Image (cartoon, helix red, strand yellow):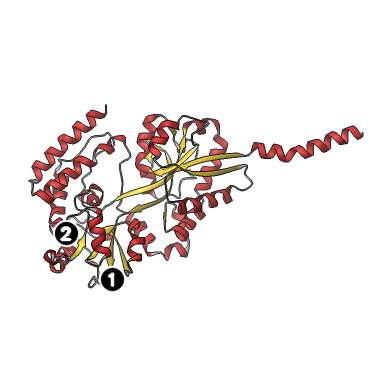
Amino acid sequence: MKRILAVCLCLMMLLPALAIAEDTQLRVWHDCDEGIVSVMEARVNETLAGSGVSVAFEKKPGMTDQMKLYGNDAVNGPDMYLFAHDSIGMYAAMGITAPVSDILSEEALSDLLPMTREACTYDGKLYQVPVYFETLLLLYNKALWEGEIPGTTEGLYEYMTAHTDAAAGTYALVNQHSGAYNVSPFIYGFGASIIDESAQPHLDTDAMKEAVAYNSKFAALQADGDYNTVTTLFNEGKAAAIIGGPWLVSGIRAAGIDLGICPLSGIKLPNGNGLAPFSGVQGIGLLRHAAENKRDAVEKALTALLDPQLGIELAVNSGCAPANTRSYEDERVMADEMIVAIRDTAATAQPMPNIPEMNVMWGPVESMLAAVNKNGADVDTAAAEAQAAALQAIADMQ
C-alpha cells in the first residue's frame, strides 16, 4: 500500500512539469514599432491564458531577407510573422506561408473590415489576419487653414490658387506629388489602377492618363514634393495642409501644431468619386511548417488575434486603427479623431497590390509622374514610356 501511495505521489509531483512541457510557445517575427508590439503581445497572451499556448514576438530588422533565409526552418525560423500585407504574394510565391483561411472559419473572420480582408487575400485565400491599418489623410494646421475643408477637389484647387505664394515659400497644401503612394488618391479615384491581379500593368489607360493630368495641376501649386521637403514645410508653418498619414502625427504635435484631420474619402473628384488612397494593413501571417505541425496551437493564437479587445487596446494605447469592426463599438476608440478618419477612409481606400510584380511598378509610375509634374512632359508620351518600362521590368522577373 505504501508503495502504491509513493508511486501516486511521484506522479502527482510530475503533473505540473508535464503540463509545462505540453505548453506551446509560438514565435512571431516582426519589424514594427516596439510599443505597438508590446501591446499586442500582452493582449494576445492574456486572451490565451490557460490555453496551453502563448506567443513571443521577436524583432527582426530586414524581415524579408530573414524570411527568405529561415522561412522553411522549423527550428530557427518563426511560426508566424507580423508584417505589411503587400508582401503576402512574395512570401506565398516562395512557398513558405500557408493561408490562415484554411484554419479559421468564415464565421470567425466575419467582423473584419472588408477592405482589410481584401488586402490580405492572395490567389483567393486569406494569408494574414488583419490587425490594424493606415491610410493617407488630409492633415491641416487649424491656425493657418481658413474656413472648412472643401468637399470637392475643385474647391480644394480654388483654395490652393488663392492661398499659395510659391515665391514667398508658403503653400496651402503640400504633397509628395510625384510619389505613386501619395498620388494613389487620384489614380484610384479616377478608376485607374497600377497593376491588376494577373500582373498586367495599366499605366497607359485613359483613366490613368486622366488621373495623371489632373494631379499635375495640383502639383503646379505645390513644393517640389519629396518627403522631407513637404514635411518640413508643414511642421514649420509654411504650408497650411499636407497629404500624409498617422506616421507624421508625432512630429506635427512636437512642432506644437493644432492639428485638424479630414478623411480623403469625403473629398469628391469631378466624376463624383471620393479620393481613394492606398491603404496598408499590418497582419499576422502563418508559416507553412507551423500550419502543418502546430495546427491546434496556431488556431488558438489566430483566434485570439480576432478578439475585438486587441483592436481596442491598440487604438487606445498606440493610436492604431483596428481591422476589427467590433473594436469601434468602444467609445474610447470613437473619440480618437485620427482613428475615425482612417476608418472612414476605408470606404474608398484601395489596398496596395500584394502580388510580387508590384515591387517593380513603383519606379515606372514615379518616372511618369516626375516627367509630367517636374519636366512638363506630354502625358500620353510619359504614360506610353511607363507602360513599356513596367512590362519590361515584369518580364525581367521571370
Kindly identify the residue that appears in the image at 48 percent across and 39 percent down. 80
Q: CA distance from mark 2 to mark 1?
A: 19 Å
Residue matched to label 2 = 222
Image quadrant assignment for residue 173 = bottom left
The amino acid on which the numbered mark 1 sits, given as a three-letter code, is Lys
Query: Relative to 179, is 289 on the left or the right?
Result: right
Query: Relative to 154, is 253 on the left or the right?
Result: right
Local SS, label 2? loop
Q: Is residue 396 above or below residue 330?
A: above
Dividing the image into 4 quarters, which one contains the N terminus? top right
Kindly identify the residue that appears in the image at 36 percent across and 30 percent down. 93
First-in-chain label (2 vs 1): 1
Q: Count the marks: how many?
A: 2
Q: Position of residue 58 (x, y in %)?
A: 49, 43
Kindly identify the residue that appears in the image at 56 percent across and 42 percent down. 300
**Whether residue 274 can be seen here:** no
Between residue 362 and residue 324, name the one nearer to us: 362
**Whether residue 246 can be seen here:** yes
Q: Position of residue 61 (x, y in %)?
A: 41, 42
Q: Is residue 299 above or below residue 254?
A: above
Query: Relative to 251, is 99 on the left or the right?
Result: right
Query: Relative to 248, is 147 on the left or the right?
Result: left
Between residue 159 and residue 176, name the one nearer to us: 176
Q: Can you tell which mark lies on residue 39?
A: none
- Mark 1 is surrounded, within 10 Å at the Cα level, by few (under 14), some (14 to 19) or many (20 or more) other residues, namely some
Q: Is residue 69 above or below residue 308?
A: above
Query: Is there a contact, CB below 8 Å, between mark 2 and mark 1?
Result: no
Local SS, label 1? loop
Residue matched to label 1 = 142
Q: Position of residue 229 (x, y in %)?
A: 22, 57
The amino acid on which the numbered mark 2 sits, given as a three-letter code, is Gln
